[in-house]
Image (cartoon, grey):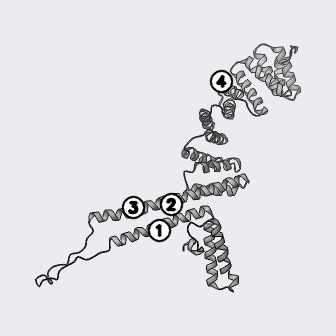
């Protein structure tokens, strides 16, 4: 069934012409006008089916490709039939001596004929494969665009299903893998699935971006694969040397989980230089950089960072305690005792052990 013939329009008909033809035929064949006559009911279904396809730009494009393919196939078949129609040899009448003794020559394919046949069928196969690739691409893009709309409307399950369809028709669709990984990470918290999709994203992407590696590092962290997370943050930074968040996250990873304190100091310094967007992040960067300075015996630098934290958070009992610990290291016991007492008074109970240890015979005499 040719949808254009069904609607009575040409293959170059405009959307308006298609719509007008549909309305006219729908009224003409509507079952309600013919008391349930099955003929008109079937015609009405055919008209409706044709309109559903030709009124949708994507479906119409795919249908036009299908028509072109069928036309090419028909032309090839007709050409082959005409070319290889057997015509018997022109023979003179047999002599008496030939009759019943000479076999009639039989027609045979020669090598050239087989090459022609092979070329025709090979062309048909190649054309079919190209057509399938085009139609799969159109379908994949259509599903991907629908998924983006649904993500904007936070319809996560439907978006995930459309992305899965897009990937089915185009297994190398890096953008679809990326969007599906986002849903699996942020909505479903299915980190193994998200990690698999991000692996596919990076494998199929023509251009690797810092964001791809950054998101994969977040999955690795959730799965407690901290070494791989650090490696992906490093990849992200190599692509984008101004990736503030990646420097910050790598610094936190190195300071809190990998015990790479000199490296953590460099990451926090770079993230602070680039400018962290949130005050809480700046405070944490200073806090953990100070802690890393303390553990690498850079006590004066640690004091500077801790005091910057106190300017933002004057009631931070743990920072007063840590300042006291640094001051003990630099033989400023009186000042340390004062900070231990502030920490204790603000609710940091662990400070009592240091007060008993260092401050029994010492008068607190200096501020932090």
Which residue occupies 56% across, 63% down?
62
- Compare marks 2 and 3 and give the one earlier in the sequence: 3
Residue 199 position, x and y percent, is: 58, 45
Note whether 99 is above or below 266 in the view shown: below
- Compare marks 3 and 4 and give the one earlier in the sequence: 3
Numbered disc in front, either 3 or 4: 3
Q: Quadrant of residue 346?
A: top right
Alpha carbon distance from label 2 to label 3: 15 Å
Q: Is residue 298 left or right of residue 357?
A: left
Residue 297 position, x and y percent, is: 70, 18
- Mark 2 lies on a secondary structure that is helix
Q: Quadrant of residue 208?
A: top right
The residue where tag 4 is placed is: 262
**Would you say the residues marked 4 and 1 are in contact, meaning their CB atoms lie under 8 Å apart?**
no
Which residue occupies 62% across, 75% down?
47
- Compare marks 2 and 4 and give the one earlier in the sequence: 2
Mark 2: few, some, or many residues within 10 Å (few <14, many ≥20)?
some
- Compare marks 2 and 1 and give the one earlier in the sequence: 1
The residue where tag 3 is placed is: 122
Residue 132's disc number: 2
**Would you say the residues marked 1 and 3 are in contact, meaning their CB atoms lie under 8 Å apart?**
no
User: Viewer-proximal residue, 304 or 119?
Assistant: 119
Residue 292's disc number: none
Q: Quadrant of residue 40?
A: bottom right
- Mark 1 lies on a secondary structure that is helix
Alpha carbon distance from label 2 to label 1: 16 Å
Alpha carbon distance from label 2 to label 4: 56 Å
The residue where tag 1 is placed is: 71
User: Viewer-proximal residue, 256 or 137?
Assistant: 137
Alpha carbon distance from label 4 to label 1: 71 Å
């Amino acid at each position: 069934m040719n949808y254009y013939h069904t609607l009575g329009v040409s293959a170059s008909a405009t959307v308006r012409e298609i719509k007008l033809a549909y309305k006219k035929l729908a009224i003409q064949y509507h079952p309600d006008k013919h008391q349930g006559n099955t003929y008109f009911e079937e015609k009405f279904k055919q008209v409706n089916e044709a309109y559903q396809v030709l009124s949708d730009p994507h479906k119409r494009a795919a249908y036009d490709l299908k028509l072109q393919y069928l036309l090419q196939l028909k032309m090839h078949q007709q050409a082959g039939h005409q070319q290889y129609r057997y015509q018997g040899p022109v023979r003179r009448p047999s002599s008496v001596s030939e009759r019943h003794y000479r076999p009639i020559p039989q027609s045979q394919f020669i090598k050239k004929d087989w090459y022609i046949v092979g070329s025709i069928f090979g062309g048909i196969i190649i054309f079919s494969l190209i057509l399938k690739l085009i139609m799969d691409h159109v379908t994949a893009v259509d599903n991907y665009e629908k998924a983006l709309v649904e993500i904007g409307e936070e319809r996560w399950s439907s978006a995930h299903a459309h992305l899965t369809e897009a990937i089915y028709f185009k297994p190398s669709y890096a953008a679809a893998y990326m969007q599906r990984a986002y849903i699996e990470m942020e909505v479903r918290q299915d980190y193994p699935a998200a990690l698999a999709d991000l692996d596919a994203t990076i494998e199929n992407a023509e251009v690797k971006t810092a964001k791809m590696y950054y998101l994969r590092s977040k999955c690795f962290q959730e799965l407690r694969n901290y070494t791989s997370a650090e490696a992906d943050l490093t990849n992200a930074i190599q692509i984008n040397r101004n990736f503030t968040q990646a420097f910050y996250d790598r610094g936190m990873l190195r300071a809190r989980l990998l015990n790479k304190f000199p490296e953590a100091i460099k990451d926090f310094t770079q993230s602070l230089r680039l400018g962290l967007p949130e005050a809480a992040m700046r405070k944490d960067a200073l806090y953990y950089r100070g802690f890393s300075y303390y553990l690498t015996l850079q006590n004066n630098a640690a004091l500077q960072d801790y005091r910057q934290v106190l300017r933002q958070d004057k009631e931070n009992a743990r920072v007063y305690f840590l300042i006291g610990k640094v001051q003990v290291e630099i033989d400023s016991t009186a000042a340390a005792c004062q900070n231990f007492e502030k920490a204790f008074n603000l609710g940091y109970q662990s400070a009592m052990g240091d007060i008993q240890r260092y401050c029994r015979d010492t008068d607190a005499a200096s501020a932090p």
